[in-house]
Amino acid sequence: MASGLAESASQAGSAEFLKVLGEAAEAMQLQRQAKTMAGSIVRGGLVEIQKLDNLVIVSDLHGDMESLFRILGEIEYDKFLSNPLNKLVFLGDYVDRGSDSVGILYSVCSLKSRHPDSVLLMRGNHEAPAEFPFSPHDLPYDLIDRFGDDAKMIYRRILEFFKLTTLAVVIRNDLLLVHGGLPTEPDALEDFRESISLAQENHVHSRVLEELLWNDPRPIVSKLGWDRSSRGIGRHFGSQATKRWLAATGTRTVVRGHEPCQGFKIDHDRMILTLFSSREAYQDFKAAYISVDADRLAEIKDAEDLSKYVKVLD
Ligand SMILES: [Mn+2]
């Protein structure tokens, strides 16, 4: 079954790709309008999962089909996704760097359209609005290779789809999920639900979207609580921001992606677990995912505890 999806993902032409992208976008639009998906509240770019059976978290894929389908095989995804209270959360960065960005987009959209209650697609910095320039951004060229004259129109539809992806997920009083990191401006925390749910709409005059997508944790930062990022966009944030966001959201551990590592790494006094799920374009690093059931998740104290449920692909 997994190989059937992988095959369609690598071969789909323009019409088939647009159909699957459109179905996923429609499912996400409907959930935003209804403000709900099974066991969860949807507030624009923020999803709060209240009821959960099992959780799988997949981080940056960057066009790496082999890693994605190894993970889907290991979790027996067809069975896993048939329970609406099982959640498969992708932390974003589907595209660029690896060899099949289009195949990854097709795959995650197909999963979302077939299992809208169980699949959650988050936004990475590689799914950013056009106002945030970054590199490498190979996706437009991959689209030309794959779809020729249709590439421009398909890219526009993909950019619209990116606006519907989720910016942060709060899982019960356990986990806070973002792609990059935590916003450092204190006003973002006054009402975290509002600042995250509207971050996409407000991104021209608020830093929240940029910081969620681009920030990285660092052990030591300036007295302001942040430093300029070596990425040229986003910030390095200190453990004070992490502490405040955990307190505001009532959670114990942050899970984020964005930085290649040996599958996972732990920062900020065990408050943050960084997960990475792509290997193809990162030969010196490892790919991993998290798989944990709701009862065990309720018992974890911090990122060190959570790391027991990280599965590193060999
Ligand atoms: Mn990233």
Image (cartoon, rainbow, N blue to C red):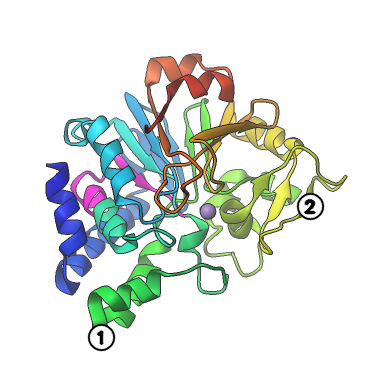
Q: Nearer the viewer, residue 167 or 91?
A: 91
Q: Which secondary structure, mark 2?
A: strand
Q: CA distance from mark 2 to mark 1?
A: 43 Å
Q: Nearer the viewer, residue 55 or 283?
A: 283
Residue 229's place in the image compared with 86, above or below, is below
Quadrant of the snapshot with the C terminus: top left
* Tag 2–tag 1 contact (CB < 8 Å): no
Q: Amino acid at mark 2?
A: Asp
Q: Position of residue 188 (x, y in %)?
A: 67, 50
Residue 148 located left or right of residue 285: left
Q: Quadrant of residue 242?
A: top right
Q: Is residue 111 magenta?
A: yes
Q: Position of residue 234 (x, y in %)?
A: 66, 58
Magenta segment? 110-123
- Residue depicted at 51% across the width and 24% down the height: 307
State whether label 1 is within 8 Å of ligand 1.
no
Residue 288 located left or right of residue 257: left
**Which comes before the other along the chain, label 2 or label 1?**
1
Q: Residue furthest front?
A: 284
Quadrant of the snapshot with the N terminus: top left
Crowd around label 2: few <14 · some 14–19 · many ≥20 (10 Å): some
Res. 227 mark: 2
Q: Which secondary structure, mark 1?
A: helix
Residue 22's place in the image compared with 291, above or below, is below
